[in-house]
Amino acid sequence: MRRSLVVAVMAIMPMVGLANQNSRPDIQVNVPPEVFSTRGQSSQPCIQCCVYQDQNYSEGAVIKVEGVLLQCQRDEKTISTNPLVWRRVKP
């Protein structure tokens, strides 16, 4: 029984390999390096982000600017599409 199972698996393996070759077309896509680099370009606009020095930060992010800790938080007083603001974090 075990021997016939091994023979059956060995008979099926080449067919599986051929099926995979037919279902995977060989496609080459050339992508310019600018796609992966933002040198000299500003960041993409962010819907809900805090921005500092042309960098987007999400809610909860903490940065240190000139010795002061700032956290990106929601502004409860503002109704807009970008209600996040930088607030000073007390040590």
Image (cartoon, rainbow, N blue to C red):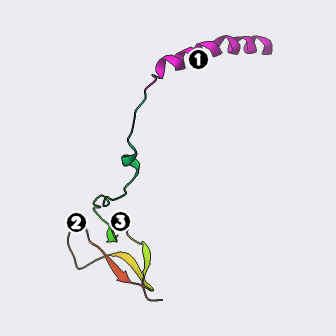
Marks 2,1: beta carbons within 8 A: no
Secondary structure beneath dot 1 equals helix
Image quarter for residue 81?
bottom left
Q: CA distance from mark 1 to mark 3?
A: 47 Å
Image quarter for residue 48?
bottom left
How many residues crowd around disc 1 within 10 Å: few (fewer than 14), some, or many (20 or more)? Answer: few
Q: CA distance from mark 3 to mark 2?
A: 15 Å
Q: Which residue is mark 3?
A: 56
Where residue 80 sits in the image (x, y, percent)? 20, 69
Marks 1,3: beta carbons within 8 A: no
Marks 3,2: beta carbons within 8 A: no
* Residue 72 horizontal side relative to residue 67, left or right: left
Q: Which residue is mark 2?
A: 81
Where residue 91 sits in the image (x, y, percent)? 48, 89
Q: Residue furthest bottom?
A: 91
Q: Is residue 7 magenta?
A: yes
Q: Please give the range of residues in magenta.
A: 1-27
Sequence-first tag of 3 and 2: 3
* Residue 76 horizontal side relative to residue 71, left or right: left
Q: Give the main secondary structure of the magenta stretch.
A: helix
Viewer-side residue, 85 vs 29: 29
